Image (tube, coloured by chain):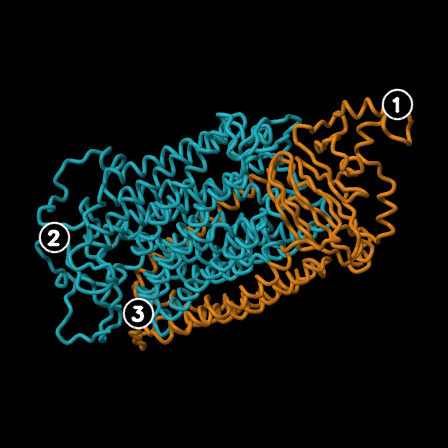
Chain colours: A cyan, B orange
Amino acid sequence: MSEAMHVHPEVITTHDVHHNEHHVHHHNETFISKYIFSQDHKTIAKQFLITGIIWAIIGGLFSVLFRLQLGYPDTNFPILETVFGHWAKGGRIAPEFYYALVTMHGTVLVFFVLTAGLSGTFANLLIPLQIGARDMASPFLNMLSYWFFFLASVVMMSSMFIQTGPAAGGWTSYPPLSALGAASIGSKLGMDLWITSMALFVVSSLLGGLNYISTILNLRTKGMGMTRLPLPIWAMFFTAVLGVLSFPVLLSGFILLLFDRNLGTSFYLSDIYVNGQLLPNEGGSAILFQHLFWFLGHPEVYIILLPAMGMVSEILSVNSRKPIFGYMAMLGSLFAITILAFLVWAHHMFVTGLNPFLGSIFVLLTLLIAVPSAIKVFNWLTTLWRGNIRFTPATLFAIGFVSLFISGGLTGIFLGNSTIDIHLHDTMFVVAHFHIVMGVASFFGMFAGVYHWFPKMFGRYMNNTLGYIHFWVTMIGSYLIFWPMHYEGLAGMPRRYLDKSSWVSFSQFGELDKMITVVSIIVFAVQLMFVFNFFYSIYKGRKVRTQNPWGANTLEWTTPIRPGHGNWDGEIPEVHRWPYDYAKDGREFIPQNEPVGPDESKH
Amino acid sequence: MQTFFVVAILVFGFLITFQIAKASEYVAVLRGEEKSRKQSNRVNAFLLLAFLIVGLIGVYYCNVKLKDKILPESASVQGVSIDRMLWITMGLTGVVFFITQILLFWFSYKYQESDNRKPYYFPHNNKLELIWTVIPAISLTVLVTFGLVYWYRITGDAPKDAMIVEVTGKQFGWEFRYPGADKVLGKKYFKNIDEKHENPLGQIWEDTYNHDDVYVAQEMHLVVNRPVKLVIGAKDVIHSVGLPHFRMKMDAVPGTPTTLWFTPRFTTKEMQTKTKNPDFVFELACDQMCGKGHTGMRGVVVVETQEEFDAWMAAKKPQYLVANPQLDPSVKKDSVIAAAITTPH
């Protein structure tokens, strides 16, 4: 360990490319150009992260509210009426409000937190720092990416304060429900605002994604071959590719929906008699929207998951003081997942009347994803094997990620098999599955990233004790909430039911639902503690005094403790090796910028 | 007041936690960061092992508590193979689950940082990679093969003698139509829907196949051991016909009819004895969010013997006659018939 605790100025070698970029800190920065309309990738990363945290609190709070309804359907909570007025008359959550909460919870967490908040933060922070670049390929577009996200946030937020409430058709917003104001109050103005916000979000995502791709391809420092990239960078690269290729399809789906809503077209509408009213639309297909939606929707879950996988690989390797096992296999499996992510979307649609033959192709392709996923899991396990593991909060969250990814990934094998999916589709089993594998697991990846790179972001550490409490409560809580939920699904209990007491088949889980609600409130409270720890530590955390506090090999730890715009004061270091030379030749770690010694062993 | 106390307790608890956390940081600095870091490393390594053990006990306990609350034996022939598929998958994934979770936490505990251990430089090994590519690939092939065999069997064409029932979802309820003696459902067109004039499904009265079709709301009757083919549609938004006891499900999409067939194995009465619950009924649940009344979109399925079914059906009047009472022979017989047929609704 001692080697990790002091700086290695002697290993920083320089070279003469990028010489003319040597202009760090030369221009005068105002408060606005430094903190608001900043073009520094590190500041933009922080903007994404803090906006993501605010959204996560809102989205998490919504889940607490609808969990109250699910756990205590017969209890009045007068405070709800005080806060939400006619949406919770008499302290009881109205069905319209319940569905608005569910919809906003999904939208906010999937898109605003786990897409923008996760890859927005870490792609921005890590790409230039780990590939050895002074900034993104286009810092200006990068800044726009954040501000489009900000606009999307403003529009989405405003939709929560209008008379008819926000969108309430689920985060998937299937038409005709989402297309017809007569079918649901949430499909009135709230839905138009939702579509507008999502369109802005897609723009943000594309600006970001194109930038990440071109930066990774073009701005790598000397010696940084593609196979010397740290795994988070590869993960961000594939994430960006997924986003760039699939978000436009989603946008097209939304635009057609907007037309159906406002211009009288019939892309998704046909043969409708709603609320005593006959609609003229004929010939549309409601299923078309689902194809367009899930063509993004499925890659989206990998957009959420891949960055977490990349960061977990890095953190596990650094903290077990051992190379990541099977770097090329990790890369290959990321690539395989990326390709397959585009070819499995219809597994969300096995029971829509999809042609069974077509369904069978999607079964095959879906279950194929289990192969690269299994490779990743076994490689992580082998990385831990015979390591010398330091349990920082980041490491714990990374281990938690692997555990959750296993649990949630295995239930995917149930759902991806169309035969079983007939029974489990749209039940609580699905809710349990995707929350574990995509929601909580990715959150764990994100937390791991925040704890690990906080010293780089703010030059201070987060409080460890709070970090450990945060991890253990969240880990135990996640399993308590989502593990028993599978049983509700096996009983056939549908998703999105707000009160099961009138059902013979689903009313037997009352006690369980109460337990889940109590646990989710505790887990939510602990997340608030994390948020407190985060903001408190920005100003009052223990100061980082060494350049490379984790003894890591990657380039971000060769920058000053608080790097300015441009990242390296001197020249950008040159890279001589892959990033995972830990425990090699008796050395604890060998940074990437250290030249290969004459008698160094080959691997 | 209660809320206030809860909030106060949370805030208080948080403040205490924070003070302890802060203090432990100072203590760490005083005692030597390296020393206290190593101590918390040991604590966390132990907790990971404890989590594994308690977690595995928890998995067992959860199963004991909840296994009787999931569904009884499948009430349809097709559901039996779905259940079998589920158990095959459960077995296979269960083995993987226990192996990988145990390795994960055991490795974490065993290889916690120690001054005596040198981590092992082990960057890759093609043989290992090959093993854990091929084994999952083979297991998945097994799952896919079984799955698809069952899938094609279940989604294949319904037997010729299958009974036909049309199911229509609407906000927020279910409507059923039986084809009557001619065994053919008459044509319908959504613009003919006219609830005031007793034509809730938009049947075209000119189509004589419609004349004996029977309309029922909320309750579907089926015959035990007789295959039934559901022709599924929706009037307004997407719904989904969920039949948990039969392990069946199919979306109801406005404008795009879908189908589903299965063979009930037990009558409702048999299920009441089997589950020892005299109130047992087969329920039809909407599985696709369809608006504010989604939760209450409940239908009842009654499975009975052929005789019981025939008796039930005999008491029903075709919707054609309900909508055109002047044509009903049991009400009155006169010459309005001809006039009524030429001016249908």
Crowding at dot 1, Cα within 10 Å, few <14 / some 14-19 / many 20+, comes out as: few
- Label number found at residue B335: 1
| Residue count near mark 2 (Cα–Cα under 10 Å), binned few <14, some 14–19, many ≥20 | many
Q: Which residue is mark 2?
A: A571
Which picture quadrant has residue A599? bottom left
The answer to whether residue B36 shows anywhere in this view is no
Res. A208 image quadrant = top left
Quadrant containing the C terminus of chain A is bottom left
Tell me the element at label 2: loop
For the point 50% across and 52% down, the residue is A435
Q: CA distance from mark 2 to mark 1?
A: 103 Å
Q: Which residue is mark 3?
A: A322
Q: Position of residue A464 (x, y in %)?
A: 37, 57
Q: Chain of mark 2?
A: A
Q: Amino acid at mark 1?
A: Ser
Question: Which label is found at residue A300?
Answer: none
Viewer-nearest residue: A394 or A152 = A152
Count up the numbered dots: 3
For label 3, the SS is loop
Residue A312, image x and y in percent? Answer: 36, 59
The amino acid type found where label 2 is placed reads Glu
Q: Amino acid at mark 3?
A: Lys
**Dot 3 and dot 2 residues touching (CB under 8 Å):** no
Q: Height in image: A408 above or below A212?
A: below
Q: Is residue B52 left or right of residue A511?
A: left
Task: Assign the N terminus of chain A to one quadrant of the image.
Answer: bottom left
**Circles 1 and 3 in contact, beta carbons < 8 Å:** no
Q: Which of pointers 3 and 2 lies earlier in the amino acid sequence?
A: 3
Query: Which residue is located at x 50 percent, y 28 percent?
Result: A265
Q: Chain of mark 3?
A: A
